[in-house]
């Protein structure tokens, strides 16, 4: 019988044993996680939850499972999410900006993720083309169907819940570009920045793209800087998490240049590992260790090879790395470290 070490159980030894007997169908490294998923479902059914609660959990899990299946074949392709209003019409300046940005980022071998509705979402799909697009659609009574550019594509996913849809936007994207929009776009912009600010998602470029001559994002930036920054409601470094762009070319460069040196990151125990696209020499390491000392618990930044967990998982083991003990508090400084690494990298 498969051994399960987790203390998370149903409370019924016989029932636990029945679950364990099913796990020979599951790859060994994943058995404990699948055991806990089944236990969760059974505990939900035996506790004081109404049918609506069970339907919510079931629908959310099915939406996530299907989304993982759709995105799975494209895991190695970088993706940029485009947010913006559904009310902006084709031909309007913001629509053309979104379309041109999507076309140019697709020309750089990125894929585009956006909602499947009209407006900025449609512009993103028109610009990138269906082959390089994902439609992450929310089912609403007043937006009944997907736009014509993604409607019949297998990379269209329909969601009942906003929260599962947001999970997939954040999980699958390496960059975010936001154009003018209403409550939904404001919600997405602040939630995205909150997730990066608190370390719930990895650092990524966040670009606020306005039409030439537009003031939407300048006014947003002024409000956040004045009302949040000056009042001490956010840290001084937090505004480095976002960039305002007034041309498509500026937005494309901001997205792509973010990854000029930085590749990805991973925690290994208490140490934070940055995978990079170039080696960092001793002199640069010393300068970085001094400049970013406030976010380092002890020691400095050192160059390393792939760690044992990364080798075990086949996690980009060929890339150069730096490592340091991060305080897990000053997340905005990680963006400043990425900027510094890029500034030290010849174009």
Image (tube, grey):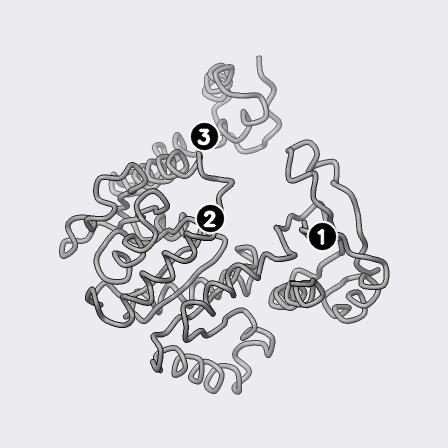
**Residue 342 at what x, y percent from top left?**
66, 63
**Residue with the mark numbered 2:** 109
Regarding mark 2 in the picture, which secondary structure is present there? loop
CA gap, disc 3 to disc 1? Answer: 45 Å
Residue 278: mark: 1
Q: Is residue 105 above or below residue 190?
A: above
Q: Residues within 10 Å of mark 2 (few under 14, many from 20)?
A: few
Kindly identify the residue that appears in the image at 43 percent across and 52 percent down.
Answer: 107
Separation of residues labelled 2 and 1 (CA atoms): 21 Å
**Viewer-proximal residue among 218 and 235:** 218
Dot label at residue 325: none
Q: Measure how far apart labels 3 and 2 are at the Cα level.
A: 42 Å
- The part of the image, by quadrant, that contains residue 120 is bottom left
Name which of mark 3 and mark 1 comes first in the sequence: 3
Which label's residue is closer to the chain start, 2 or 1? Answer: 2
First of labels 3, 2 by sequence position:
3
330 and 91: which is toward the camera: 91
Q: Mark 3 or mark 2, which is nearer to you?
A: 2
Q: Report the front residue among 207 and 6.
A: 207
User: Disc 3 or disc 1, which is closer to the eye?
Assistant: 1
- Give the residue at x 73% y 51%: 271
For the residue labelled by badge 3, is the local secondary structure a helix, a strand or a loop? helix
Say whether marks 3 and 1 touch (CB < 8 Å).
Answer: no
User: In the picture provided, is 173 more to the left or to the right than 83?
Assistant: right
Residue, disc 3: 39
């Amino acid at each position: 019988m498969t051994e399960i070490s987790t203390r998370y159980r149903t409370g019924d030894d016989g029932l636990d044993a029945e679950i364990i007997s099913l796990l020979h169908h599951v790859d060994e490294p994943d058995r404990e996680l699948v055991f806990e998923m089944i236990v969760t479902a059974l505990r939900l059914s035996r506790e004081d939850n109404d049918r609506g609660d069970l339907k919510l959990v079931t629908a959310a899990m099915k939406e996530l499972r299907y989304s993982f299946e759709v995105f799975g074949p494209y895991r190695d392709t970088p993706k940029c999410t485009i947010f913006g209003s559904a009310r902006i019409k084709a031909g309007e300046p913001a629509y053309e900006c979104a379309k041109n940005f999507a076309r140019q980022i697709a020309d750089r071998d990125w894929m585009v993720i956006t909602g499947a509705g009209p407006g900025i979402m449609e512009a993103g799909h028109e610009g990138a083309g269906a082959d390089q697009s994902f439609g992450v659609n929310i089912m609403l009574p007043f937006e009944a169907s997907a736009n014509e550019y993604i409607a019949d594509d297998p990379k269209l996913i329909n969601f009942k819940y906003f929260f599962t849809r947001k999970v997939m936007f954040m999980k699958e994207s390496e960059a975010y570009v936001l154009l003018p929009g209403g409550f939904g776009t404001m919600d997405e912009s602040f939630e995205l920045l909150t997730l990066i600010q608190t370390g719930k998602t990895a650092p990524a470029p966040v670009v606020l793209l306005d039409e030439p001559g537009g003031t939407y994002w300048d006014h947003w930036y002024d409000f956040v800087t004045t009302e949040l920054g000056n009042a001490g409601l956010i840290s001084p470094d937090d505004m480095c998490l976002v960039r305002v762009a007034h041309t498509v070319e500026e937005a494309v460069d901001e997205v792509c240049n973010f990854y000029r040196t930085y590749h990805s990151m991973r925690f290994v125990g208490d140490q934070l590992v940055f995978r990079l696209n170039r080696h960092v020499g001793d002199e640069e390491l010393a300068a970085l260790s001094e400049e970013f000392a406030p976010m380092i618990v002890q020691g400095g930044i050192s160059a390393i090879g792939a760690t044992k967990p990364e080798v075990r998982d086949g996690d980009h083991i060929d890339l150069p790395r730096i490592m340091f003990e991060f305080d897990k508090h000053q997340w905005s400084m990680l963006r400043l470290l990425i900027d510094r690494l890029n500034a030290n990298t010849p174009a």
